[in-house]
Amino acid sequence: MPTIHLIDGEKGGVGKSLVARTMIQYCLDKNMPFVPVETDRSNPDVAGVYKGICQYAVFTEDERQADKADRIFEIAMNKTVIANLAAQSHRAVKEWIEKNQLIELGESQGVYFCKWFVSTGGYDSLNLFKQSVNSYGGKVPHVLVRNLGLCDDWEHVNSDVTIQEVVKKYNIKAIDFPKLAYKERNIIDQHRLTFADARQYKEFGIISKQRVVNFLKLAYAAFETVGIWYEEVK
């Protein structure tokens, strides 16, 4: 069933675009019917990399432009959507979903939502995660994406009572998003390479190419543990 995958994190610099680009490559490699959508006007780096297939949409609290996000749902009537959200867009996205009663409309049309919340493991990031989950009251399933590239020890999260209460209450799933080695990531970002291009990039030696392959293998395995790619999100 088509799902609108919202790649969020609310703050900038948490790794949203890397997760979105990896998820796009996952769908391409798996030959899944999907459409990537860029909503970050100030830093549209996902569209800059996957420019041949990306659509654009805008989330705004300005009522005169509120319909600029509608194409996301319209696309999802036929294909899964991967939407890269801009920083500080939570309120606009929530307003769009609630004012248009998209949860209810989605249920009648076979369209579902899933928010992948990318976190650094920092205090502010985790607070924003809790706020996002609580604000939807379980109506939009969340996946906590533990970005190992920015934090390699999540024991403080596992032992945090308030976070674990939220996780248990709403049956939140969590994944470990792997670290991409700095050298390879910098070159990929600098040259705006898709991951398909990066696997074959002539300037990479055989070990660098293997690092990219290994990164994707780990990321894909993490995505699949959530188990929502071919079925309704529960």
Image (cartoon, helix red, strand yellow):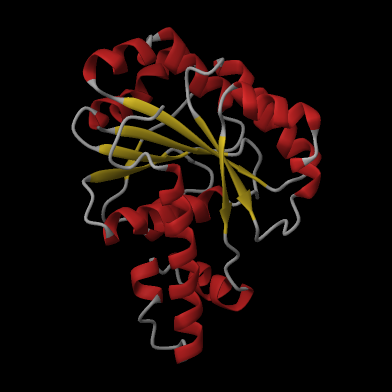
Pick the residue in front: 86 or 3. 3
Quarter of the figure with residue 167: top right
User: Is residue 111 at all visible to an observer of this figure?
Assistant: yes
Most extreme residue toward the left, as rendered? 78
Could you say which is closer to the camera, residue 98 or residue 129? 129
93 or 166, which is in the foreground? 166
How many numbered marks are there? 0
Q: Is residue 233 left or right of residue 78?
A: right
Q: Compared to 37, does 234 lie above or below?
A: above
Q: Quarter of the image containing the N terminus?
A: top left
Residue at figure coordinates x 41%, y 75% from the top left: 198
Note whether residue 61 is visible. no
Where 101 sits versus 6, above or below?
above
Which residue is pictured at 35% across the width and 81% down the height?
200
Q: Where is residue 216 drawn, in percent x and y?
A: 44, 66
The quarter in which the C terminus is drawn is: top left
The x, y position of residue 146, in whole percent, is 63, 49
Residue 53, position as x, y percentages in the image: 26, 52
Residue at the (62%, 21%) spot, across then down: 169
Residue 47 in the image, given as x and y percentages of width and height: 39, 51
- Seen at 69% across and 31% down, the residue is 128
Q: Image quarter for residue 104?
A: top left
Eyeballing the image, is 42 above or below 193? above
